[in-house]
Image (tube, grey):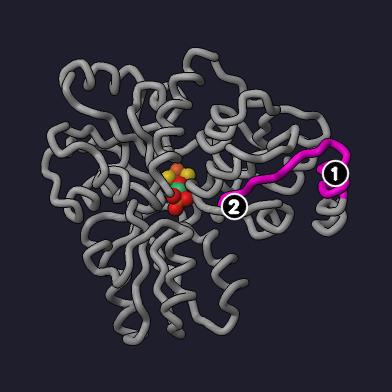
Amino acid sequence: MVDNRSLAEKIDALKKEKNAVILSHYYTRPEVQQVADFVGDSLALSQKAADTDADIVLFAGVYFMAETAKILSPEKKVLIPDSDAGCSLADSCRAEDLRRFKEQHPDSMVVAYVNTSAEVKALTDVCCTSSNALKIVSALPADRKIIFAPDRNLGDYIKRVTGRDDIMLWNGACHVHEKFSVEKILQLKNEHPDAKVLSHPECRKPVLLASDFVGSTAAIIDFVGSDGGREYIIATESGILFELQERYPDVVFLPVPPEDGACGCNNCEYMKLVTLENIYDTLLNETPEVTLDEDVRAKAEKSIRAMLDMSF
Ligand code: 13P
Ligand code: SF4
């Protein structure tokens, strides 16, 4: 059996030989984040994918993220180590259902979270991520109704903060973030009264209301740096703990466990499908490769570029 160190060295050599870059989300395994050239949240990853000069982009993350890279860089070879790395949130919005809903609301604009398929992005006016959703929705014309898809929790949060009640929410959610319950947070708060609660906006409303800070993965990481506290209760996927602990080794991070009776833990099993072994095989064999219908890609690109243009 090959150990992680020698696999990482072999991956490094292949990257150089093939002019490849590895982009990874914070939710992947620690050893995967360590071989990546860039680790970020969804927004930063899409910005990186848009301006890399590598010939091959290997996306250590879930499928919609690799698709986003391909949409933005169609001339590059985009690889994903496991094409079964899906996303429950992306799966909760099918393109044919969104198309039908749009037909019923022809005057609306569609804002879709990047956690969607290329087909859904092709039906979207402007994409958003958890980093920029507030900024994007706030910048849209006040006289246009908005269809916000697919995350009902993020959508409801945006609706409350912006005060725009003309937002129609899609009924989708992430199975990992929906598992956090306010009871578990209050238990932890009881044991650690000085700890601030930091949560991702995909969590349910009671969790967000019990939080001191709500933000994307990158925003949570940055918040700890600027806040300078000693203890934090973290309500998001467990992969973030690696970066938090690396950056702030003296700080205590308390992950919120899922509610009683919920199966699994606060891991996204799709993100954890990416391993050093399948990264190596994928780079070596240059497969599985992400491919897209050109018409869908070109339409999807418009909604992502609209987001990137509004994100500065
Ligand atoms: P970020 O926008 O924080 O990267 O979130 C992506 C994601 O999949 C959250 O579950
Ligand atoms: Fe999708 Fe949830 Fe996993 Fe993020 S954590 S990739 S939203 S299933």
Q: Is residue 83 magenta?
A: no
Amino acid type of the residue tagged 2 in the rendering: Thr
Q: Would residue 88 be visible to someone looking at this image? A: no
Q: Nearer the viewer, residue 110 or 184?
A: 110
Rendered position, 2 above or below 251: above
Which residue does the image show at 74% across and 48% down from the upper left? 276
**What element does badge 2 sit on?**
loop
Closer to the camera: disc 1 or disc 2? 1
Rendered position, 247 above or below 288: below
**What element does badge 1 sit on?**
helix
Rendered position, 190 above or below 121: below
Q: Are marks 1 and 2 in contact (CB under 8 Å)?
A: no
220 on left or right of 82: left
Q: Nearer the viewer, residue 76 or 115?
A: 76
Q: Position of residue 85 (x, y in %)?
A: 56, 37
Label drawn at residue 202 = none
45 on left or right of 226: right
Q: Nearer the viewer, residue 34 or 256?
A: 34
Which residue does the image show at 44% across and 20% down from the upper left? 299
The residue tagged 2 is: 28
Quadrant in which ligand 2 is drawn: top left
Q: Position of residue 151 (x, y in %)?
A: 31, 42
Q: Position of residue 95 (x, y in %)?
A: 36, 21
Give the magenta-colored segment's residue range: 10-25
Q: Give the CA separation, mark 1 to mark 2.
A: 22 Å
Q: Residues within 10 Å of mark 1 (few under 14, many from 20)?
A: few
The residue tagged 1 is: 16
Q: Residues within 10 Å of mark 2 (few under 14, many from 20)?
A: many
Which residue does the image show at 63% across and 55% down from the upper left? 29
First-in-chain label (1 vs 2) = 1
